[in-house]
Amino acid sequence: MSLVDIQDVRKSFGPLEVLKGVSIEIGRGDVAAIIGRSGSGKSTLLRCINGLEEFQSGAISVDGMMVGKTDLRTLRRHVGMVFQQFNLFPHLTAGENVMLAPTVVAKLQKGEARDRAAALLEKVGLAGKFDAYPSQLSGGQQQRVAIARALAMEPTVLLCDEITSALDPELVNEVLRVVEQLASEGMTLILVTHEMRFARDVGTKLIFMHQGRVHEEGAPKTLFAHPQTPELAQFVTGAH
Amino acid sequence: MTYQMSFGDLLPYWDVLARGLLYTIILTVVSTVTGLAVGTAGAWARSFGPKWAGYAVGAYVELIRNTPFIVQLFFVFFGLPAIGVKMTESEAAFLAMVINLGAYSTEIIRAGIQAVPKGHLEAAASLAMSRLETFRYVVLKQAFMKVYPALSSQIVIVMLGSAVVSQISAEDLTYAANFVQSRNFRAFEVYLVAALLYLLLAIAMRALLRGIGRALFPKA
Ligand SMILES: Nc1ncnc2c1ncn2[C@@H]1O[C@H](COP(=O)(O)OP(=O)(O)OP(=O)(O)O)[C@@H](O)[C@H]1O
Ligand SMILES: [Mg+2]
């Protein structure tokens, strides 16, 4: 059975239908790259998976938990999320950002949470930055802290919404390398991205959203080489 | 006619003034701490609480911000006994000041809460934090950080405004000055000294608040 199972999800904001019956299955260890034009519903779909948005019909399950029926906090302990704007807590150091949820939510001992945070910061290449405040870090470093923070809750699946889009070009790679490492360790990832090369090289599954629907999906290399629809063909050429 | 100044006539009463000053300091500190707690709760109710609580707090804030402090004080001290709520001058002074600062700081802290980016709330929610945990660990300190200068000013205003409690015979610095003046008839000297003491107190408070701010928010 797939780890994340999205069945015929529909979602409207008032009169505007943004998701018009989306079905996607994502297996354990998959790296699903979601691409598509601005406004095609990529973020909304991602936000439905961890309950940041409610949807009107259809069903989403994550590791057997039905979104909407399962208690939100239980669901979110298994679903991590990283945002375009990092959203680090500015009054806490990098280490404290990573430690917060493990201590407050998972009730880990301070020392244990500290060890875990230190290990995760090291993993994302920020071993020396435990005591730095977000304002003292570059965008790429902040985003890596945000990844470490999400990983600290040991999620089953990690959602990433355009996590390199707010970065200066020269900082994009340091973040992508971290994501690639997670992928190689078998982490299940769902990424909304504009990094086509990354989607092709690291993704195990490509999902092209268009006007609130999954317009095309399949193996990234195949899809990029042979888009079946004019919309994807145009999107792929336009993106370069 | 020339007026012969004589600050020496104040000397026999220095302890009265000192006690008044101490009273003002204690009243200010105690009602500031309590008032900020009320303001925090009020700001929470207006931002995250149930609708009815938000409206109730909104009414309280508007009522207090649009009426004179002295009337609030008189209502507490002279009005409430009519419905059986009796208290000492000090208790009434404390309560009126808490009610007053509570309302103003509700608005100030609420502004700070609104300035916290929505993305931070979503990040906290995505980390499975509850609304209350989010408020306590993510929102509150950021909010205080953002409005700390405004809060500091309000606290000094409250300290200066506390002079009004002398009107119900709470024995603060102004009450002490009135008392001394009624004994030695040295109004010019007494009120000049009282004014200087308030000035020094205000300057000291601002310095103290700045220090507290630096300690609380190291990398603001
Ligand atoms: N909270 C909201 N209220 C109303 N409309 C919204 C809301 N959020 C998104 N929308 C609308 O839903 C549509 C899809 O938005 P969404 O953010 O999911 O697109 P996207 O594919 O992520 O686009 P982008 O590449 O620009 O991030 C857009 O038309 C957007 O204006
Ligand atoms: Mg988006």
Image: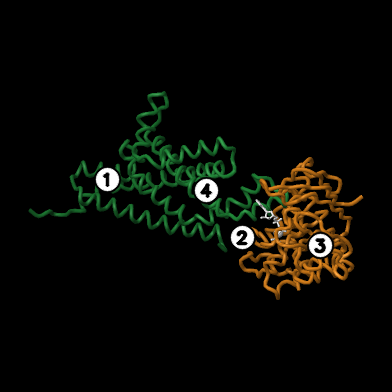
Between tags 4 and 3, which lies in front?
3
Circle 3: is it few (<14), some (14-19), or many (20+) Cα within 10 Å?
A: many
Chain B's colour? green
Q: Do tags 1 and 3 sit on the same chain?
A: no
Q: CA distance from mark 4 to mark 3?
A: 40 Å
Q: Which residue is mark 3?
A: A33
For discs 1 and 3, the disc positioned in front in the rendered view:
3
Residue under numbered circle 1: B177
Disc 4 residue type (three-letter) = Arg
Whether residue A177 appears in this view of the structure is no
Q: SS at mark 1?
A: helix
Q: Nearer the viewer, mark 1 or mark 2?
A: 2
Q: Report helix, strand or loop for mark 4.
A: helix
Name the residue type under label 3. Ala
What x and y, as percent, mark residue B28?
41, 46
Mark 3 falls within which chain?
A
Q: Residue at x 79, y 61 (%)?
A: A34
In the rendered structure, the residue with mark 2 lies on which chain? A
**Image location (x, y in percent) of residue B146:** 52, 56
Asked whether, in this view, residue B218 is left or right of residue A120, the answer is left
**View extreme (bottom): residue:** A170
Closest to the observer, B1 or B124: B124
Marks 1 and 2: same chain? no
Chain depicted in orange? A
Q: Amino acid at mark 2?
A: Pro
Q: Nearer the viewer, mark 3 or mark 2?
A: 3
Q: Residue furthest front?
A: A230
The answer to the question of whether label 4 and label 2 lie on touching residues, with beta carbons closer than 8 A, is no
Q: What is the secondary structure assignment of the residue under circle 3? A: strand
* CB under 8 Å between discs 1 and 4: no
